[in-house]
Amino acid sequence: MALAAPLAALPAQSRVARLATLDDTGHPHVVPVCYATDGRAYYSAIDAKPKRTPADRLKRVRNIRANRRVALLFDHYEEDWRQLRWVLVQGQAELLSAGPEWEAARDLLEAKYPQYATLPLPEGGLMIKITPERVIAWSAAE
């Protein structure tokens, strides 16, 4: 699906996306995530920010292990509602923990988020890879 310019730029320009997974009862679980893309897939690390649960036991990780179908939402909000827009990417997720693709994804995330200079991504840490299958978009301007 070819998106119009403002919509096409939204995933690249956004700083935060919302990751939706499904639990074993079919209920959605949505969390904000930092992410980066190489143009083919989206990557989000389970980083060292404080969490109440070990990385491999986080609900999003457990959900992906049970059901790889996920969605990633990028949105733009303004008080002028004529400027509202969003892009929803539906796809398959997988968990990476090592290898050249993990390293390339880490490099993308570190380039996008300077915070990772003081909170580095741990070697062997979990990385979520989302391969898009469908893109849905909406803009109030169109």
Image: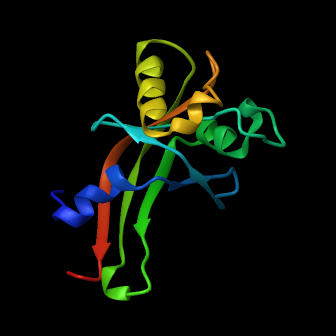
Decide: is 106 above or below 93: above
Question: 73 left or right of 140?
Answer: right
Q: Position of residue 41 (x, y in %)?
A: 35, 37
The residue under the point 73% across, 32% down is 55
| The residue positioned farthest toward the top in the image shown | 99
Question: 4 left or right of 60?
Answer: left
Q: Position of residue 113 (x, y in %)?
A: 50, 39
| The residue positioned farthest toward the right in the image shown | 52
* Residue 14: quadrant of the picture: bottom left
Q: Position of residue 69 (x, y in %)?
A: 49, 47
Decide: is 32 above or below 62: below
Give the image's coloring scheme: rainbow
Q: Nearer the viewer, residue 69 or 100?
A: 100
Q: Position of residue 139 (x, y in %)?
A: 28, 76
* Residue 29: quadrant of the picture: bottom right
The residue under the point 57% across, 32% down is 116
- Quadrant where the C terminus sits is bottom left
Question: 109 left or right of 142?
Answer: right
Q: How many marks?
A: 0
- Quadrant where the N terminus sits is bottom left
Decide: is 127 above or below 26: above
The residue under the point 29% across, 83% down is 140
* Residue 80: quadrant of the picture: bottom left
